[in-house]
């Protein structure tokens, strides 16, 4: 059971805790694509931050449980450490706190709420607390925190919009419902929808129409709107295949970095080996699908086992 001070009494409670201190309050609000559940997962997912956000350096996760995380981060390249405590107070509401040099305390309240099937609201408010003689710094910090939140929401848009689209297409995730533990498992969590019918690719008809872009002429995309696959042609008898949606948490692998038989996820930096088809090994099962090379065709079908 978790007990916490109600958000409406935070400012007063902080002032009463230490008389003579100064408190500055700020706020940022926006709409975001996707469900509250996916916004919560995005918030609790630590691993995406170094790859998506330019403002984050590596964090050291000291401890975590289903409803809390305790992390150590650095202030840029300076040997200046900040301990960040992140707590889920209830569904759609989080408290995040940190101190700067033991002199300034920042308490942030993050709230997510349902708007409609496509969007959710995001409201972030913060309280900056210090001795009165440090109050001139508050104005700088308040602007800094506001600009940081603007940037974070812009950078997270690619993740949130992709997850919202995948939900419409019938994707689910093993990390549902999210918590701090499940959101940080670097395992294959994507549950793909079933193919309506097997995909059959004539390897003699690879054309530029299917090429991902001019720099990746050996990569081709095939499939349905809801679910598609990336095929890398090594020769007329050797191919690598990946789902175009990342097996981890749903990133578009079309935006990944392909090298040899691997692709690097653009969200979390994980590497995924393609399913290799050749004359010597013409059938393989991976990522929930069966891939088969026979005569001049590659066939992709559901793995029902």
Image (spheres, rainbow, N blue to C red):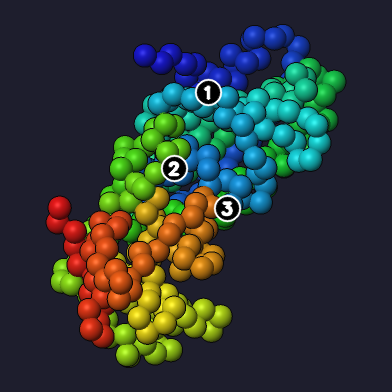
| Mark 1 vs 2, N-terminal side | 1
User: In whole angstroms, how far apart are the C-alphas of marks 3 and 1?
Assistant: 23 Å
Residue beneath label 3, please? 52
Residue beneath label 1, please? 63
Density class for disc 2 (Cα within 10 Å; few <14, some 14-19, many ≥20) is: few
Residue 104 vs 115, above or below: the answer is above
Q: Residue 215 vs residue 163: left or right?
A: right
Residue 107: x, y in percent? 61, 26
Residue 295: x, y in percent? 23, 84
Density class for disc 1 (Cα within 10 Å; few <14, some 14-19, many ≥20) is: few
Q: How many marks?
A: 3
Density class for disc 3 (Cα within 10 Å; few <14, some 14-19, many ≥20) is: some
Q: Nearer the viewer, mark 3 or mark 1?
A: 1
Given residues 36 and 286, the one toward you in this image is 286
Residue beneath label 2, please? 186
Q: Farthest residue toward the front?
A: 280
């Amino acid at each position: 059971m978790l007990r916490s001070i109600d958000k409406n009494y935070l400012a007063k409670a902080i002032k009463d805790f230490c008389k003579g201190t100064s408190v500055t309050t700020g706020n940022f609000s926006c709409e975001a694509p996707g469900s509250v559940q996916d916004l919560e997962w995005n918030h609790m997912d630590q691993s995406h931050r170094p790859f998506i956000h330019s403002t984050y350096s590596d964090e050291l996760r000291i401890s975590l449980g289903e409803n809390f995380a305790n992390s150590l981060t650095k202030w840029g390249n300076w040997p200046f450490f900040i301990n960040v405590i992140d707590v889920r107070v209830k569904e759609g509401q989080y408290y995040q706190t940190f101190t700067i040099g033991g002199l300034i305390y920042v308490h942030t309240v993050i709230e997510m709420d349902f708007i409609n099937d496509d969007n959710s609201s995001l409201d972030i408010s913060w309280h900056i607390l210090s001795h009165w003689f440090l109050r001139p710094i508050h104005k700088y910090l308040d602007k800094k925190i506001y600009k940081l939140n603007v940037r974070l929401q812009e950078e997270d848009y690619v993740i949130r919009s992709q997850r919202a689209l995948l939900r419409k297409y019938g994707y689910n995730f093993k990390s549902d419902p999210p918590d701090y533990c499940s959101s940080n498992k670097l395992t294959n969590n994507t549950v793909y929808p079933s193919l309506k019918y097997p995909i059959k690719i004539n390897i003699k008809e690879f054309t530029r129409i299917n090429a991902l872009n001019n720099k990746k002429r050996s990569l081709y995309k095939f499939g349905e709107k809801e679910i598609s696959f990336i095929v890398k042609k090594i020769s007329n008898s050797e191919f690598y295949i990946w789902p175009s949606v990342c097996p981890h948490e749903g990133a578009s692998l079309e935006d990944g970095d392909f090298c040899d038989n691997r692709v690097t996820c653009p969200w979390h930096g994980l590497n995924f080996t393609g399913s290799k088809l050749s004359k010597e090994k013409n059938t393989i099962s991976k990522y929930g699908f069966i891939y088969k090379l026979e005569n001049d065709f590659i066939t992709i079908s559901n793995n029902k086992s």
